[in-house]
Amino acid sequence: MSQVYERVALIGLGLIASSMFWAIKRGGLAGEVTGYARTEETRATAREIGLCDRVCDSAAEAVEGADLVVLCVPVGAMERVTEEIAPHLAPGATVSDVGSVKRAVIDAVGPHLPPSVHFIPAHPLAGTEHSGPRSGFAELFDNRWCLIVPVAESDPEAVRRLGQLWSAMGANVDEMDPDHHDLVLAVTSHVPHLIAYTMVGVADDLRRVTDSEVVKYSAAGFRDFTRIAASDPTMWRDVFLNNKDATLEILGRFTEELFALQRAIRTGEGDELFDYFTRTRAIRRSILDAGQDVDAPNFGRGAAR
Amino acid sequence: MSQVYERVALIGLGLIASSMFWAIKRGGLAGEVTGYARTEETRATAREIGLCDRVCDSAAEAVEGADLVVLCVPVGAMERVTEEIAPHLAPGATVSDVGSVKRAVIDAVGPHLPPSVHFIPAHPLAGTEHSGPRSGFAELFDNRWCLIVPVAESDPEAVRRLGQLWSAMGANVDEMDPDHHDLVLAVTSHVPHLIAYTMVGVADDLRRVTDSEVVKYSAAGFRDFTRIAASDPTMWRDVFLNNKDATLEILGRFTEELFALQRAIRTGEGDELFDYFTRTRAIRRSILDAGQDVDAPNFGRGAAR
């Protein structure tokens, strides 16, 4: 594969940025990759493990001369970072991000950018429950989707080039408008995370069932919630604060349905439960057919296998 | 390893029974294993794949001469099956089950058994999202828990022997009383399944987000819910109808906490969200330490890796 950008600057060095670095190296997709992280500790780790060709001590230094700058910080930190780098951006550079919400990022970042740069928000739908500079790996985006969310002023050629980078990092690329993005993600990601966090919190709080029982007997379903609920707290706080409307809308739908099932349990409506549980099986089949999961039995996974 | 029972009869040939058969064969734990399933189709499949040493056309025939009979049918079918086999049970035989609720099984099965047999309910906490006779594998119980739930009359020696079988099939064995079992499982399994089913149902219902979008973009969290929500509908209908009180109690706690988080989102209480999400991380760590899950990055799994 060949170089898509001359110099890529990664601002924030967590799971997504570190995976981007390794994917860019795997494909030889950039001449140089610079990186910046807010804490001295993260920068030291990055230097130790060879994450980024050059780790800089300021965001301003990292973006200098870059033709692509990617904001890989929590959504709530994007405005501050943008203000910091704006005066140092090269004319003609593309500024993108990897935030899980898009309307709020557009509102926070857009107004601070000089008119000489291209602003093209994006969101790779990939992740693990791990975070930090050591958690990245080159294959994270393989066969995953990256949603590019152009704003009105986005230059088509710059959009095409950013899409080319994500494709070359292994992702399938789609375009979507910001409000629809935020609704789709509320359904497929944000509300599922919130209810997983809640379920784990309930288990932890319950005085009549001990934590050690919850842990010992977690293989029966609960375990998969703890995996989701182990994701980065700062990132998720910012997601919910910045996708409030869609999250609350879907949460409303969720509790409505949950109450209907709760009522069916209370009144012993077995057929209603059976029909509901049958219908949800079909979606699973579609996800397997679409290559977005593997069919290996997963609840049975464990140290002994 | 050596033989624990002379003849084991498995009534119902789904995921758990088929895994028990392969685990018993792996360890040479029984002289003969007979099997019975209600449908002709399942019996034919069992014969085709060599599941059970002998597949019988009636439950009565399957239990004849068995020193261990295990009921592996949905909880709602246990009473009928017990009535059918009761006259044919060998004196001194142990009758056990693998149902996910225990109080209701004790009430449904116990009264129909002759005093000459030992009734020892049990529940292996292992499973996958697959069901049916082809879904079993010998390793399913390795390093998983099996909860034995003796009733007042259970003979200690018979309890010890059943525990020995489960240990030899790879499980860790614990004893628990029925009501506590049903509460612990409501937390670690039943309510998590119900909310996963609900979330998948909501996604399917939502007219503003298409099913194909839900499927394409499922890797961001939703996917893990569909895996749980693909479990057997009959089994789960019966679980909820037969563990009504504990399920409704935990569901009440769940909605209480969910509403608190929803309120924090609405009012922008970032610190409250952050603290909640941080606390739930610790439980994940404990589950890994207890060997009940593996730490390999899982959200990134997929066909391409």
Image (tube, coloured by chain):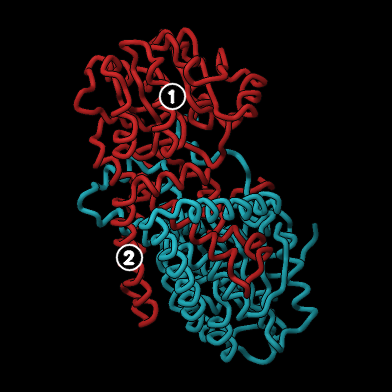
Chain colours: A red, B cyan
Question: Badge 1: few (under 14), some or many (20 or more) residues near its Cα, within 10 Å?
Answer: some
Please report the residue visible at 44 percent of the width from the left and 58 percent of the height from the top.
Answer: A195
Q: Answer above or below: position of A203 versus A143.
A: below
Report which quarter residue A201 is drawn in: bottom right
Please report the residue visible at 43 percent of the width from the left and 63 percent of the height from the top.
Answer: B258
Chain letter of mark 2 equals A
Q: Is residue A86 visible from the viewing direction of this image?
A: yes
Report which quarter residue A37 is drawn in: top right
Please report the residue visible at 48 percent of the width from the left and 30 percent of the height from the top.
Answer: A16
Tell me which amino acid carries mark 1.
Glu
Label 1 with label 2: CB-CB less than 8 Å: no
Residue B18: percent from the left, percent from the top? 56, 59
Residue toward you, A164 or B244: A164
Give SS at disc 1.
helix
Q: Quadrant of the N terminus of chain A?
A: top left
| Side of B289 relative to A262 (left or right) | right
Chain letter of mark 1 equals A
Q: Is residue B235 visible from the viewing direction of this image?
A: no
Residue A118: percent from the left, percent from the top? 29, 19
- The residue pinned by badge 2 equals A276
The reply to the same-chain question for discs 1 and 2 is yes
Residue toward you, A73 or A126: A73
| Side of B293 relative to B196 (left or right) | right
Residue B116: percent from the left, percent from the top? 69, 90
Q: CA distance from mark 1 to mark 2?
A: 51 Å
Report which quarter residue A100 is drawn in: top left
Please report the residue visible at 50 percent of the width from the left and 43 percent of the height from the top.
Answer: A234
Tell me which amino acid carries mark 2.
Tyr
- The residue pinned by badge 1 equals A84
Q: In this rendering, which labeled residue sits more in front, label 1 or label 2?
A: 1
